[in-house]
Amino acid sequence: MKKQKLIAEINRLRRERNAVILAHYYQEEDIQALADFVGDSLALAQWAAKTDAPVLVVCGVHFMGETAKIICPEKTVLIPDAKAGCSLADSCEAEAFRRFTEAHPDHTVISYVNTTAAIKALTDIVVTSSNARQIVESLPADTPIIFGPDRNLGSYISRITGRDMLLWDGACIVHDRFSARKIQQLHAQYPDSVVLAHPECRPDVLELADVVASTSGLLNYVVKHPERKQFIVTTETGILYKMKQQCPDRTYFPAPAVDGHCGICRDMRRNTLEKLYTCLRDLTPAVTVDESMAGRALQPIRKMLDLSAQLGL
């Protein structure tokens, strides 16, 4: 089916299904252009919590669909490709994490949203890169904390908050592969460029960054600083679509990775227009979460949403 026909059919089906399409910033451009809402993990969770639509199509990776289903168990939650996983979520197996937390029973367990429902069910508070610092700082200073699964984000939050958190040793294979040496070389070619970096990047990359922020935070920086004209963008390249859309007068350089490739998440890109169409047509793949597990996982997600609201995030 040709692209314009696909788009027309997707629009027809979402009207018939009364469906809302939620897309992460790392999705391909065509999906972002079609989505009712585009955002980062926090924004997608907040949007899922407030929409009245009976059908949610989550264009992202599987844990995002799980999060939406946990928040909205009465809704039909779809994901275009059920195999769209997450290397970071995969780096934290539930039984191993349970043993880790049980070995430190006095610790508050904070888990990054990039985790499975099983990990969230073992967690006290869920965070995203948009709110991790503020939520950690909202806890009493003497609270011992386990932070998982991203060692890079955890290390960064520890450094900027002064909290000595116990970190799980996981990472995102996209952000963990950006090359500090190659970014330095690229910046030498374009010395006026601002280096933007996601906190899932390694510490040596973050040391080079002028701005460290969540995906939405990096986008907001570009929007709010029209005087800056060049940016080295050290996160998944899907965000370039929104940056160019909102600020077309700037120049963007995708940060290079150690293996010579720029940051593309193959799992995020598993979702396509064709799969979005068949997903709406057939109402499958549907995301399911064990009811008991979902109940336990909902508590830390709700705590995150409530704290985010209190903190104005």
Image: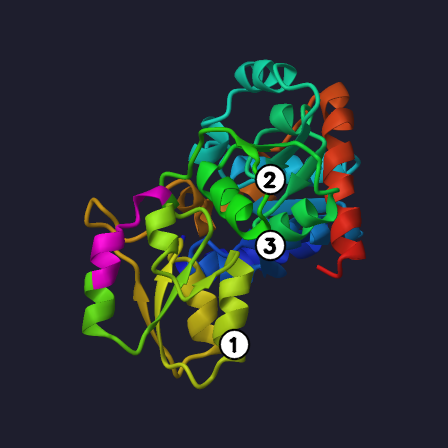
Q: Is there CB contact under 8 Å for labels 1 and 3?
A: no
Q: Nearer the viewer, residue 67 or 285?
A: 67
Name the main secondary structure of what is drawn in magenta.
Answer: helix
Looking at the picture, which amino acid does disc 3 mark?
Answer: Ser
Residue 10 versus residue 4 in the image, above or below: above
Residue found at x 54% / y 47%: 157
- Of mark 2 and mark 1, the one earlier in the sequence is 2
Q: CA distance from mark 1 to mark 3?
A: 17 Å
Q: Secondary structure at mark 1?
A: helix
Q: Is there CB contact under 8 Å for labels 2 and 1?
A: no
Residue bounds of the magenta highlight: 176-184
Q: Nearer the viewer, residue 299 or 109?
A: 109
Question: Relative to 293, is 184 on the left or the right?
Answer: left
Residue 31 in view in this figure? yes
Q: Position of residue 24 (x, y in %)?
A: 53, 53
Q: Is-magenta flag for residue 140? A: no
Q: Nearer the viewer, residue 256 or 155?
A: 155
Q: Which residue is mark 2?
A: 113
Residue found at x 32% / y 74%: 193
Looking at the picture, which amino acid does disc 1 mark?
Answer: Val
Disc number at residue 130? 3
Q: Please identify, in this view, whether the residue under mark 1 or under mark 3 is nearer the observer.
A: 3
- Of mark 3 and mark 2, the one earlier in the sequence is 2
Q: Which residue is mark 1?
A: 223
Q: Nearer the viewer, residue 284 or 180?
A: 180
Q: Is-magenta flag for residue 183? A: yes
Looking at the picture, which amino acid does disc 2 mark?
Answer: Val
